[in-house]
Image (tube, rainbow, N blue to C red):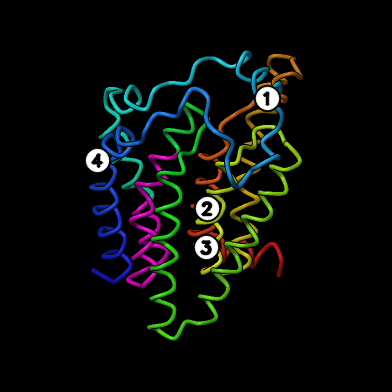
Amino acid sequence: MNDTMVAALLGALVAALGGLLVPLLVAAVPEPEAKPEPDIETETEAGSDADAEAATATEPPKMLYADIAARPGLGWRSALVAAVCGGLLGAATGLDWPLLWLIPLTPVAVALSVIDWHTRLLPRRIVVPATLAAIVAVTVVGLATGERDALLRALLGMIVARSFFWVLWRLRSAGMGFGDVRLAAPVGLVLGWVGWGALALGVWIGFIVFAVPAAGLAVVRRDRTVLKKSFPFGPFMVIGALVGLVWGTALAGRIWG
């Protein structure tokens, strides 16, 4: 058994064990307040109270995190998805240092995708600690192993990705929330470590897999207003990041050079 197979099996096993804990992680997130205070980061960018009330009036009630966590089969389904993703990451990375942050982030990404899919929210209680933990791991590994170029690229990738999504959010693009801006930070970090091509491709793929189904639904229903509705973007960001991490370097080389 070679190192690649060992890394794939190890990644699948550890990620699956983490996936079993997804219901516990979801249930541990505090429910958002009915009328939250303005975000310090967003300040005036959050929009007027009238806009918020109008948006609330047209949206169905958010599903409670406790109800999401209690959904039948969530644990084993999350474990299965995490195992597949962890196996792919292990096979692509091999027995190398990036597995230290990629595998733990895998079940976290699954949990965030589940939450966003049902609520169109990406709780900062999960995103921010996961981002900080990933930054610490990347920094320690980069300095300890002498991979300073990869470390610098990862940190710059995080800044670039978050800034890019902040601009999109500031322009109030359809389907874009501030949770997506926060999630862009760890996405940019892990993709940046791999390379600029992986970062560009991972972000681009996220938009493609998000836009194509929405456009197809609008065509099938013959209703352009579908494109103006808010959809969860987090799961598609995660899919794009996975593609970038596993196949980004090879695909970027074919596309750009």
* Amino acid type shown at disc 3: Leu
Which numbered dot is residue 9?
none
Front in this rendered view, residue 248 or 150: 150
Q: Nearer the viewer, mark 1 or mark 3?
A: 1
* Residue at 36% from the left image edge and 69% from the top image edge: 94
| Badge 4 density bin: few <14, some 14–19, many ≥20, Cα 10 Å | some
Binning the other alpha carbons within 10 Å of mark 2 as few (below 14), some (14 to 19) or many (20 upward) gives: many
Q: Which SS type dominates the magenta stretch?
A: helix
Q: Which residue is drawn at the image coordinates 39% and 83% (left, top)?
A: 145
* Residue at the (25%, 41%) spot, across then down: 21
Q: Which residue is mark 3?
A: 189
What's the distance in space between the residues labelled 2 and 3, CA to CA?
A: 10 Å
- Which one is earlier in the sequence, the residue at label 1 or at label 2? 1
Q: Earlier in the sequence, mark 2 or mark 3?
A: 3
Quadrant in which residue 257 is drawn: bottom right
- Sequence-wise, the earlier of marks 4 and 2 is 4
Residue beneath disc 2: 241
SS label for mark 4:
helix
Instruction: Write down the quadrant of residue 63 in the picture.
Output: top left
Nearest-to-viewer mark from 1 and 2: 1
Residue 20: mark: 4
User: Which amino acid, by three-letter code, is at mark 4?
Assistant: Leu
Badge 3 or badge 4: first in the primary sequence: 4
For disc 1, the marked residue is 49
The quarter of the image holding the N terminus is bottom left
First to last magenta residue range: 86-112
Q: Nearer the viewer, mark 1 or mark 4?
A: 1
Q: Look at discs 2 and 3 and give the one toward the viewer.
A: 3
As shown in the figure, which amino acid type bears the numbered disc 1? Asp
Q: What kind of element bears circle 1?
A: helix
- Sort mark 1 into few (<14), some (14-19) or many (20+) by Cα contacts within 10 Å: few
Give 139 or 187, whichever is nearer the viewer: 139
